[in-house]
Amino acid sequence: MNIINKEILSNINIADMDKYGSSITGIRLNVNNAYTDIPDLLKEYIDSNEEDNESWQQIQNRINYIYSAVSIMLAKLDEETNFILKVKEDISNNKLLIFKPNLISPICIDPTTHGAGLMIYLNTNWSIIAAIMRWFHDYANIHYSHMAIAEGGCSIELYGVQYSKYTKHTITNEAIFEGRSHDFYGDDDNFYGGWGFYFARKYLSYHCTSDEDDNPMNGYEESCKGIYLSPGEAINKMMVYDINQLQIDRSRGRTIHIPDGQNYSEIVLHKVIVGGNSSDLEDIKLYPGCVLINVPTMKLHAQDLITNALKNLGLGLYPLQCAVTENPSDTNWLYGSQNTKIPSYRSLVPHSPLIMKIDGNTHLPMRDKYGRYIIKRTAGFSGTQCDIIKAVQSQGILIVNISDNINIVNVVHAVPTEAQPIPEGFIWASLDCVALDTFCARYCFNTLPMLESKKLKKEYHFPTEFIHDVPIAKIKKQQIVSTLWVDSPLFRYYLYNDAEKRGIGSCSYYIKGVDLTNNTKLASYHGHLISLSNNNMNEVLTKTLYYNSNSILHSLQPTILSYAKSNDTLFHSNLYKELLAGFDENHDGIIDYNERDTGFENSLIEVISNTSDISAFEKYGDLKATYLRSLLWLKYSNSKWNADGHDFLKMKILTMQLYEAFKLSNNKELNHDLFFHNMVYGKGYWPSFKTAEYIYNMSTIYGGTTTETISEYSAYGSIFKYCDIVLNNSHYTSSTNALLNYFNDLKSGIKPLPFTFYIPIGFGKMNRKPIPNTVETNDPKLIFTTEFNEIW
């Protein structure tokens, strides 16, 4: 259980519960009865050629459980807001019920194993969509042909390229959303890999009428064949729309003017979302508009605070394949990475107030004649998100937000190997995305009982009472050790207030819901989540310390700054001043979420985006892309480590090295510091920064700090695998423990593989022994390059 209940010891009674503001309804269910086991059951079902009826029945049972929970929650929302009346009115006017999931990279079904894909917890689960669709069908009597999926996740088309290579069949973007590609033209073979909407269709086919208009399987063939039909043309079909693809036919998009736009005065949006031109009757017939069902999955974010209702709309609706002109061959994208064949990230929309001008050919930041980076000031990530939501709202579109908090993703939001899904068990719904996100953020950063937090707020003049325990580093007998204090990233975050000021929603809310795990009611008091049972009131609190590693300076600021100060005191370093000089733009001693250095966020996304094309289009591109991605953070953090003298990621690397120190302090075992042997780290003791820096750098390059822990998935491992595959007939990589076997063979005197990896001075040894195939150098033109039959 990740939740604790604290009794409210005061004269508060049920009549005092919140009653005003925007309505949020919710449900708490048993996590183990929801979708946790579905990937394993689905693998069994797929591997049986879809004949394992027992596995499929168990999948249905889990979706039925989610459906029962969702039914309680959405019926309560309708009771509070009467929103179904508006939904029915819009559907009667031919508008579609559009479901917008949150798909970072929709690999939830692994194409090789058919088990859980790497991104399974980072995307909206298809079973949630199935349950919600069924509720709208049953409760509002809306047939499935009046529903559709619309999504524009990152890298979808690049996965299509890779899967098509693998299968020697065309795997469309829509088929990747389906998770199952059927060859309707030839041999009837099925390819599995992607999200899984096909299985949502299959589930819904057990819960429909006999009307052809209500058959959820209609539209699947169009997905597999890549047949595009506008909503007005898709008679009796439930379609899947890739809303990234506008450049293929710009008549699918419409420019929406934003009167109070901050980053944009106008934005091009897919007509599936915003409808056709109101002055063109034929256009309106093809694109009648929608009711938008926004279904994010809750995550802690790298550039923002959280990914939830606001961000799933505020970033996810920008079309990637939309260029400056309407020429189909134009790749000068408005929102996606510049001049790449297939843009995979929205690197041109501002992720921070300051953004760098990017060279479309090198994908690197540009400098003026004095060598200074060319930087533009924007309204930041807040402006990016609020602008597009205002554009959608200006079209009179009803938005229903349903947030999956069954597992809240902690630590990272986009790296599956490091993400930590925390079983909280909630689903929340609201017509107000601002209220919903305000509440969800408050829940994450509130571990102290209400009476205690209110007292601390008053005593220390905190801007909010939603605070959590955080570790603080202090010096004790020449060691740096963790003690506890309180903090909240909400002290330093402004999106919700910005959105409220722009009329997008309200930060005020009240909660009504049910906890199915203990049969109690859910409510709120002064914004705090409360459990009610027989006049007993308990505050519901999470036990988890929520943060994102990539924004740790902002999310756990006192933790990181206190460690920097402690290290400075012990070792006469300058970390604290360096952090404030790099980030604290207004010099108030606080680094808020709008203070993000010189705009490296967009620059970093741009450089990463370029490697996506390499991964998709070059032979063995996955290996080369892994190599480049692993090294680029280091490469562009030090002007002496690249030929062009870039250092735009200097502060980014510093914060990641500080995060490494935080991770090491949380080790379960004590270890001696690598450079100061009177120090230890782990179990709440922090390493010296020199040790954290070394471990971070070596792990970035090699995946570990000893030859036994060098990873085949690191930069070094990628070079090794490439050379073994291409130049050595896969002698090592065809078996397990490839690197260790190679190192052992080198000890026996075999000739090394023909590659040379150039690294900076000090990075070529482990345990004082040279690392095979590495050469240390001070030449910036050679550092982080590799020579073999080509040069990487």
Image (tube, helix red, strand yellow):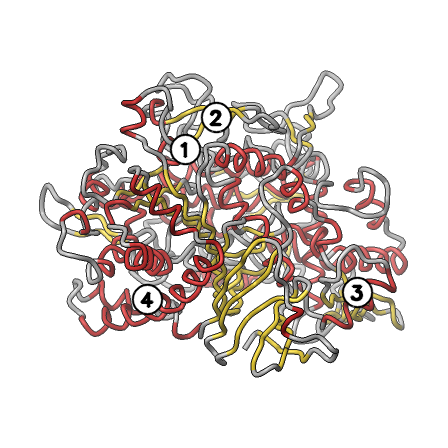
Q: Nearer the viewer, residue 100 or 91?
A: 91
Instruction: Please report whichever mark, 3 or 1, sits nearer to the chain's N-terminal start.
Output: 1
Q: Can you say whether 196 is above or below 345 in the image?
A: below
Q: Quadrant of residue 605?
A: top right
The residue wearing badge 1 is: 274
The residue wearing badge 2 is: 256
The residue wearing badge 4 is: 63
Measured Cα–Cα span from mark 3 to mark 1: 48 Å
Tell me: 203 left or right of 757. Answer: left
Instruction: Please report whichever mark, 3 or 2, sits nearer to the chain's N-terminal start.
Output: 2
Residue 315 seen in this snapshot: yes
Viewer-nearest of discs 2 and 4: 2
Instruction: Please report whichever mark, 1 or 4, sits nearer to the chain's N-terminal start.
Output: 4
Q: Which amino acid does label 4 sit on?
A: Ile
Q: Where is residue 453 in the image (x, y as percent from the top left)?
A: 77, 68
Outermost residue, left side: 186
Q: Which of 59 and 40 is in front in this view?
A: 59
Q: What residue type is labelled 1?
A: Val
Viewer-nearest of discs 3 and 1: 1
Viewer-nearest of discs 3 and 2: 2
Measured Cα–Cα span from mark 3 to mark 2: 47 Å
Measured Cα–Cα span from mark 1 to mark 4: 31 Å
Residue 110 seen in this snapshot: no
Mark 2 secondary-structure assignment: strand
Neighbourhood count class around disc 1 (C-alpha, 10 Å): few under 14, some 14–19, many 20 upward: many
Instruction: Please report whichever mark, 2 or 1, sits nearer to the chain's N-terminal start.
Output: 2
Q: Where is residue 109 in the image (x, y as percent from the top left)?
A: 33, 57
Q: Can you say whether 412 is above or below 58 in the image?
A: above
Mark 1 secondary-structure assignment: helix
